[in-house]
Image (tube, rainbow, N blue to C red):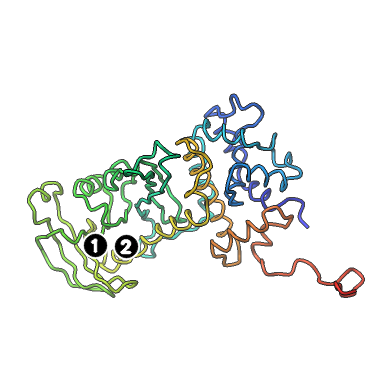
Amino acid sequence: MAKFTIFEQITALIPNSIFDNLSVKFKINRFTKGFNAWDHFLSMLCGQLCNSQSLRDICFSMSLGLHNYKALGISKLPTKSNLSYRNSHCDPAFFEQLYHRLRDYFGQHLGIQNLPKLKGTKIYALDSTLISLCLQLFDWAKYRQGKGGVKMHVLLDFDGYMPSYVYMSDGKVADNIAAKTVPIPSGSVVVADRGYMDFKLLHQWNQADVFFVVRCKDSQKWDIEKKLPAKGKNIISDCYVRPEKAESAVLYEGMLRKITAIDPETGKQIELLTNQLFWTAETISLLYQKRWEIENFFKSMKQRLRIKSFLGTTANAVLVQFWISLITMLLLKVLKAKAKYAWNLSNLVNAIRAALFTRIALFPWLDFPKAKQYDEKSEDGSQLSIFT
């Protein structure tokens, strides 16, 4: 039997130096009244891992599961009022910076997911998802008449499939408008759906030496400059094009490449637009297929962690919970990457929730989860029975 619980061993992965340095930078422990930033963070992390339905649930789980809470460096167990106050007043930028620092720290464990032909090239998927909120409770999150919501805009790094940039906006903000403020490194590739088919945005990316692969809108008309051989599996056509409308051609000056391919999942034709004139059409098509990873990321966040329902109604509380949910996802992916057993993320989440406060050695358990931990017989060798 291990000395520490699964929860304690997971939190031990977080370097104290990173947390402490940020605490000093943001002066996050001022006016804490004994319930400091570390206490707050671990309480909310526990809430994510336990799938707690309320602040009271978090307090209950912490009080029952952590018999020796001081071993974790916790100075005070949470109360409902402590958590509510900290969620409403703690600077969300602290947890945003903590996420990015931890992502840099754990980056080597997340694995490289680049396509073989594009090694050394950073690839990102850009998309957004709407998180619906009750307008009566979240009156600041106006989306439509009688409906509330916020949008989560994510730039997903294909190295580890974790966000390198996240922006929370009003639910009304269009994808192509929000994308103009997303920092994309020069020389990288961004893959996006048709919501980002905006010639001003594409021109901005092209000027910044960013390669893009975007799905075309069905209504867009083109002047074909040159037809190329349609080489590759599922490739129907490949050609250099310019926008047919003069006003569109003014917004984007330069040659574009349009590739028509068969989507292997649906069997339908899709038209892809790119400013990369030299890669094979099959590579461009494969890049767009990999865009589905961002949909898997949104699905995992919404189904496995708590970002669809929030434990506070202020904008501050929503942001704090959101960033801690991202840190939780990061820790889960690190565990999945380091384990020898081929965990499915959903099974890993369920297993950790079931064993969160048990005293089992974390990584031996992750490597061999089906191994028998205890002998079924008693110490004297006799078989135990409920009928004796």
Considering only vertical position in the picture, is 208 above or below 385? above
Towards the viewer: 106 or 70: 70
Which percent across, then down, holds residue 216? 22, 59
Towards the viewer: 100 or 297: 297
Which percent across, then down, holds residue 60? 68, 44
Q: Identify the residue position indicated by label 2 in the image.
A: 288
Secondary structure beneath label 1: strand
Q: Amino acid at mark 1?
A: Leu
Q: Residue furthest left?
A: 246
Task: Identify the residue at image location x=40%, y=57%.
Answer: 294
Q: Identify the residue position indicated by label 1 in the image.
A: 272
Q: In which quadrant will I find the C terminus?
A: bottom right
Towards the viewer: 166 or 144: 144
Secondary structure beneath label 2: helix
Task: Identify the residue at image location x=27%, y=54%.
Answer: 212
Asked whether the beta carbons under mark 1 and mark 2 sit within 8 Å of each other, the answer is: yes
Q: Amino acid at mark 2?
A: Tyr
Disc nearer the start of the sequence (1/2) = 1
**Residue 172 visible within the image:** yes
Say few, some or many: other residues with alpha carbon within 10 Å of mark 2 (under 14 / 14 to 19 / 20 or more).
some
**Residue 225 visible within the image:** no
